[in-house]
Amino acid sequence: MNKIFGRKPVLEAINAGVELEVIYVAYGQHGDVIHKIFTSAKERGIKITQISQQKFNELARSENAQGVIAVKSVATFYELSEIIEHAKKSTYPLLLLLDSIQDPHNLGAILRTAECSGVDGILITTNQSSPITETVEKISAGAVSHLKICKVNNLVRAIEQLKKENFWIVGSSLVNSKDYTSIDYKMPVALVVGNEEKGIRKLVAENCDFLVKIPMSGKIDSLNVSVATGVLLFEILRQQKS
């Protein structure tokens, strides 16, 4: 994991625009620099998490971290406009929107599947989402370096922008949804999949053009989000390539 240790080095990295996935602060830290770190991180949309001293010591190991550790991103992020411009080069543009995926193993598996299915770009939410760490990169089998990824603070606003660019928004949901095979995907598609436990958020669902589900034959009513994403993406791909 690529880390930056110490209060001033972390603050300098924030102010210099270094791509940081998350900042960890041990509970009980105070002072002017700590306040500036919280303020600057919030202004730049960088996730900041307070953790126990024990957990912090495990991350810091023998480093003198002064109660603050920043984790640098292993991914290169793109602007939404760049993602859209790139996607429009495809006959049927396909984007994947990740609404608050929190498990790094799920995120890595989803990114691997997305790369294999040839998505044109991925949007991930800044808050309530797993950062793209070395663990995610490893689980993705290196797919992170081949994908165009955009971080957005407001997914609904991003969806509104995609609609203006003629994308149809398809959300994965168990509520008020239809069989995923009943949709004609030969159009610019932005597929939305949601949090492992709660699914896509209510406001996000309300802004989707279609809500779809994968019918279950067993006693469990849903698949793991990474598996479901693969099923949905490859159905979209099958239709678009036929």
Image (tube, rainbow, N blue to C red):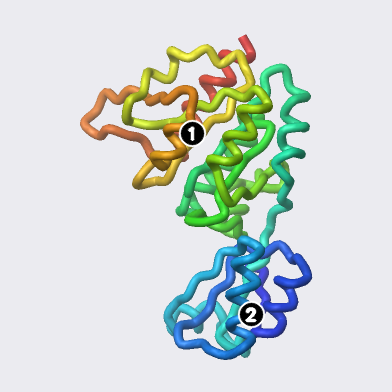
CA neighbours of label 2 inside 10 A, class few (<14), some (14 to 19), many (20+): some
Q: Residue at x 37, y 19 (%)?
A: 178
Give the percent coordinates (x, y) of residue 147. Answer: 69, 41
CA–CA distance between discs 2 and 1?
39 Å
User: What is the three-letter code of the residue carrying label 2?
Assistant: Lys
Q: Residue at x 27, y 23 (%)?
A: 217
User: What is the three-letter code of the residue carrying label 1?
Assistant: Thr
Q: Which residue is mark 1?
A: 229
Marks 2 & 1, CB-CB < 8 Å contact: no
Q: In the image as oriented, which residue stretches furthest toward the top? A: 242
Give the percent coordinates (x, y) of residue 201. Answer: 41, 42
- Give above or below for 115 relative to 218: below
Q: Which residue is mark 2?
A: 36
* Horizontal side of residue 210 vs 168, given as left or right: left
* Horizontal side of residue 60 vs 15, given as left or right: left
Q: Secondary structure at mark 2?
A: helix
Specify which label sits upstream in the sequence, 2 or 1. Answer: 2
CA neighbours of label 1 inside 10 A, class few (<14), some (14 to 19), many (20+): many
- Give above or below for 114 relative to 210: below
- Give above or below for 115 relative to 49: above
The numbered mark at residue 185 is none
